Image (spheres, grey):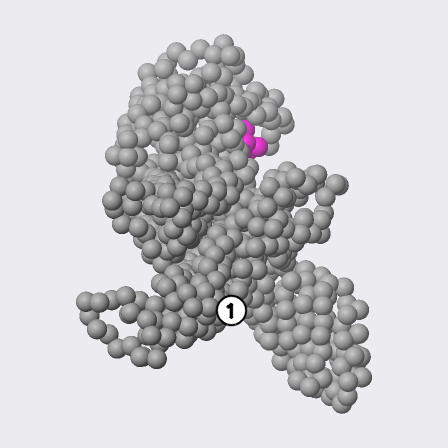
């Protein structure tokens, strides 16, 4: 299965999104098809063996929408010197077209410029310029735009067009409304042209209204072209409702104008031109505000996209040259001066500096960098000049991977949206039926009052708002996931965002999650009772154990090796080595068999612990992990290792308790050590002596108790548990396997981000519920009022103009409510190791 993102143009409401989803899902080979109305994107998963993108595009185009395939193509404009005629332009065009990776090229002789669309992965700007030079012409300074810039420009143009249409419409509909309403106002005498008095000159009055409404209909022509086309294909949408309602008003008014022309002057009281004009104007206002609000929902992505610099200074033949960022190749040596941004990911080769990585991690303190340290695109060089080797460019940089993850999350749907999707599919046809039945019922109920029936018919059509239903969920998810990214919390989809708010139990792995994951040797005890306490008689035992642990990747084993090295002890060569998962290690050194591990390992090998049991319990009670060491089947001593608790652990767990969440800790440590750590940070439930392969079973036991469980971990052995949990949360210092298994990735190693992620989920779901309540409630209440239910019981009759205003405001209100999430503030985080945080992003994003 391959996934692709297609931009869709021409959607106006949730009915459009539903129609596209249904059409695409019918295609053979489609795994999944989801349309996000707010971002105007179609996310598809399809089998490349039986389906292709052109077939999908054709299916969507057939039902009346425009499809733009997401492309990584860049577009450049190259000024060309030396062209003397049209033949020169043709020659340049042919030369560029021959290059692999060039999608399109257009050379304009009059402006002396070549516009080239190309794939940066296949073609380079320097190659394009070389082809121009080889053809005998001079390639001058390049101006470049990428797909994101073009999309931004297109949306800005769309907003400007909508505002222009609204202004033109308002210029004509306001005098139209004035002419229609003033003669009816008897309380106040407002200025009115005598030549248009409806009682004296009814035909002139009617024709004046007709002339004023025509420009309004003209600027709103898309409501009719799209609406009637959708109606013709039996998939009506919001435009169809507007088109039917305003067409009915205009046609009925034209009929009455014709009646006036033939002497039926009373028909002047049955003109609805102003209704049609004002409805279109109000809808255009609503659409303009909606477009602006929709643009604001994706601000997080725009901010991320705007972080990377456009150029890089590359060292070529010992000379610094500034080139476009797309020209950077892996292996290039790049110079970065103070105050400049890092253009791509790489490793420092010379120089010392401090780099501000806050745009990626949220950490405010700059990080010192020296030769061998990693640097990341979009981070800011604050002090010194340095050079680094480019290692990840384009879509492979950490920043690019984060942008992709956030985009994918924003395109996903939350389960809570399912009811809205179902309703949206049937909404417009049902509204059309209600409008028709209401109009007919009132026509006969009022003894043939056609004017009254038309009022009811139009009101029902224009008050119904499928847009609010379609925007309720995706807008909140877009703002929520974007806000998460701003706070270093990457949420992988709408389902994860929704499930997180239900969590009532969180399980933390101990090592590297609650603790720093950097244990140190604290005590060395020998069987004769001599106490090394990291200095003295235990050196020989420490050296032998460290020699055995050299082949181990376990943090405790590495701590023992580092402890021996720090004391300057000589490590012995190892003949054989075997890692005993969840228990320890076994090694042969100089003919002796060395066992180092926990009590389980000693019990398995029937090694007596007498003499050190009390000391072991004391160490465990202090939160230290006792490692038993046996040589040739005889216990020789204990090496105690302790892992420091993270500064943020206790505060994070306290906050989770305040949120009503139970906190558990899972560890392979013995019960006493685990209990000591748990007591320090306030853990509710301790799951100790758990083998790595059994962690997922422990999570399942909690789920079997009916608890919604989240697992927070960082290691490879946490991956099954992260996958088993309702929500898997991988923290900043984690491995790529943990990141892949997780639903939420925390870019920092700060546990305070865990309650922040849960709170963000709760705020987002609360916002979605508010949006859905308003969207459903508005339609459930508004449609019956428009159908005349209040009038039936002596109440007022809803004017179609007010119905249109209410409809326009309903969508805007849903969007405005979603934008309130932008005010979400994370509680203060404590500092976390920068390099670990960024390394996790690199690994977790699959870079």
Q: Nearer the viewer, residue 523 or 386?
A: 386
Q: Position of residue 412 (x, y in %)?
A: 51, 43
Q: For residue 593, what is the image quadrant?
A: top right
Describe residue 191's horizontal placement relative to residue 441 as left or right: left
Q: Is residue 608 visible?
A: yes
Q: Residue at x 40, y 43 (%)?
A: 444
Q: Is residue 168 left or right of residue 716?
A: left
| Residue at the bottom extreme of this rendering | 84
Residue 481, compared with residue 498, is above or below; it is below
Residue 626 point in image, percent of width and height = 40, 24
Which of 772 and 257 lies nearest the eye of the viewer? Answer: 257
Height in image: 748 above or below 195?
Answer: above
Residue 400, placed above or below residue 521: below
**Residue 301 in view (yes/no):** no
* Quarter assignment of residue 785: top left
Residue behind mark 1: 218
Residue at left offset 46%, top offset 68%: 262
Residue 482 image position (x, y, % from top left): 43, 51
| Residue at 63%, 51% in the rendered image | 63
Q: Residue furthest front?
A: 263
Provide residue 36's location: percent of width, then percent of height.
51, 48
Looking at the image, how many numbered discs can be counted on the residues? Answer: 1
Residue at 60% across, 29% down: 574
> Which residues are drawn in magenta?
547-554
Q: Is residue 398 magenta?
A: no
For mark 1, give the secondary structure: helix
Q: Quadrant of residue 669?
A: top left
């Amino acid at each position: 299965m391959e996934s692709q993102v297609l931009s869709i143009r021409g959607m106006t409401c949730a009915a459009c999104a539903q129609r596209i989803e249904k059409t695409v899902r019918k295609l053979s080979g489609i795994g999944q098809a989801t349309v996000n109305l707010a971002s105007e994107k179609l996310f598809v998963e399809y089998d490349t063996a039986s389906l292709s993108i052109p077939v999908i595009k054709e299916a969507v185009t057939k039902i009346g929408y425009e499809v733009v395939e997401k492309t990584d193509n860049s577009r450049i404009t190259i000024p060309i010197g030396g062209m003397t005629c049209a033949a020169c332009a043709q020659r340049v065009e042919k030369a560029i077209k021959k290059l692999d990776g060039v999608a399109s090229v257009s050379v304009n002789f009059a402006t002396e410029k070549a516009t080239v669309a190309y794939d940066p992965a296949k073609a380079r700007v320097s190659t394009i310029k070389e082809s121009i030079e080889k053809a005998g012409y001079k390639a001058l300074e390049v101006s470049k735009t990428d797909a994101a810039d073009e999309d931004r420009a297109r949306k800005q143009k769309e907003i400007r067009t909508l505002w222009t249409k609204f202004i033109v419409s308002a210029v004509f509909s306001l005098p139209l409304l004035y002419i229609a309403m003033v003669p009816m106002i008897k309380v106040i005498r407002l200025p009115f042209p005598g030549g248009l008095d409806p009682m004296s000159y009814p035909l002139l009055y009617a024709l004046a209204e007709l002339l004023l409404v025509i420009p309004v209909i003209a600027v709103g022509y898309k409501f009719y072209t799209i609406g009637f086309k959708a109606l013709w294909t039996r998939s009506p949408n919001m435009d169809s409702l507007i088109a039917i309602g305003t067409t009915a008003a205009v046609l009925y008014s034209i009929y009455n104008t014709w009646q006036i022309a033939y002497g039926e002057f009373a028909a002047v009281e049955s003109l609805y031109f102003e209704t049609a004009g004002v409805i279109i104007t109000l809808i255009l206002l609503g659409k303009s505000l909606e477009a602006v609000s929709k643009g604001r929902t994706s601000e997080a992505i725009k901010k991320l996209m705007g972080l990377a610099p456009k150029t890089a200074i590359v060292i070529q033949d010992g000379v610094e040259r500034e080139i476009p960022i797309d020209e950077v190749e892996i292996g290039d040596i790049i110079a970065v001066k103070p105050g400049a941004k890092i253009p791509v990911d790489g490793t420092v080769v010379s120089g010392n500096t401090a780099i501000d990585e806050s745009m990626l991690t949220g950490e405010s303190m700059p990080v010192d960098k020296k030769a061998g340290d990693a640097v990341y695109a979009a981070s800011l060089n604050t002090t010194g000049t340095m050079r680094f080797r480019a290692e990840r460019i384009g879509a492979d940089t950490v920043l690019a991977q984060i942008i992709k993850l956030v985009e994918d999350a924003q395109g996903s749907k939350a389960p809570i949206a399912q009811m809205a999707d179902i309703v949206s599919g049937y909404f417009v046809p049902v509204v059309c039926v209600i409008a028709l039945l209401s109009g007919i019922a009132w026509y006969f109920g009022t003894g043939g009052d056609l004017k009254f029936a038309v009022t009811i018919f139009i009101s029902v059509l224009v008050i119904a708002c499928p847009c609010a239903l379609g925007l309720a969920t995706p807008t909140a998810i877009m703002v929520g996931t974007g806000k998460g990214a701003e706070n270093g919390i990457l949420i992988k989809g709408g389902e994860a965002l929704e499930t997180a708010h239900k969590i009532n139990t969180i399980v933390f792995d101990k090592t590297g999650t609650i603790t720093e994951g950097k244990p140190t040797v604290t005590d060395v005890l020998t069987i004769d009772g001599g106490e090394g306490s990291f200095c003295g008689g235990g050196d020989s035992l420490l050296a032998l154990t460290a020699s055995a642990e050299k082949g181990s990747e376990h943090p405790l084993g590495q701590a023992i090796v580092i402890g021996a090295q720090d004391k300057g002890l000589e490590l012995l060569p190892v003949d054989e080595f075997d890692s005993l998962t969840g228990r320890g290690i076994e090694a042969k050194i100089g003919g002796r068999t060395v066992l180092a591990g926990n009590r389980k390992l000693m019990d398995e090998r029937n090694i007596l612990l007498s003499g050190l049991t009390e000391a072991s319990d004391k160490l465990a009670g202090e939160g230290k992990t006792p490692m038993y060491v046996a040589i040739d089947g005889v216990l020789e001593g204990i090496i105690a290792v302790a892992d420091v608790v993270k500064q943020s652990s206790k505060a994070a767990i306290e906050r989770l308790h305040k949120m009503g969440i139970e906190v558990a800790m899972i560890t392979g440590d013995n019960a006493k050590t685990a209990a000591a750590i748990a007591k320090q940070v306030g853990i509710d439930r301790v799951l100790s002596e758990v083998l790595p392969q059994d962690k997922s079973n422990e999570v399942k036991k909690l789920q079997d108790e009916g608890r919604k469980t989240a697992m927070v971990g960082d290691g490879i052995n946490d991956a099954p548990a992260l996958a088993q949990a309702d929500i898997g949360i991988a923290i900043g210092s984690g491995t790529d396997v943990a990141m892949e298994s997780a639903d939420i990735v925390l870019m920092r190693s700060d546990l305070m981000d865990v309650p922040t992620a849960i709170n963000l989920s709760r705020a987002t779901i609360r916002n979605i519920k508010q949006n859905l309540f308003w969207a459903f409630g508005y339609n459930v209440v508004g449609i019956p009022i428009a159908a005349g239910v209040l009038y039936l019981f002596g109440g007022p009759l809803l004017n179609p103009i007010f119905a249109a205003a209410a409809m326009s405001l309903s969508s805007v209100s849903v969007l405005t409510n979603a934008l309130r999430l932008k005010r979400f503030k994370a509680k203060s985080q404590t500092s976390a190791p920068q390099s670990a945080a960024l390394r996790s992003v690199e690994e977790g994003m699959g870079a």
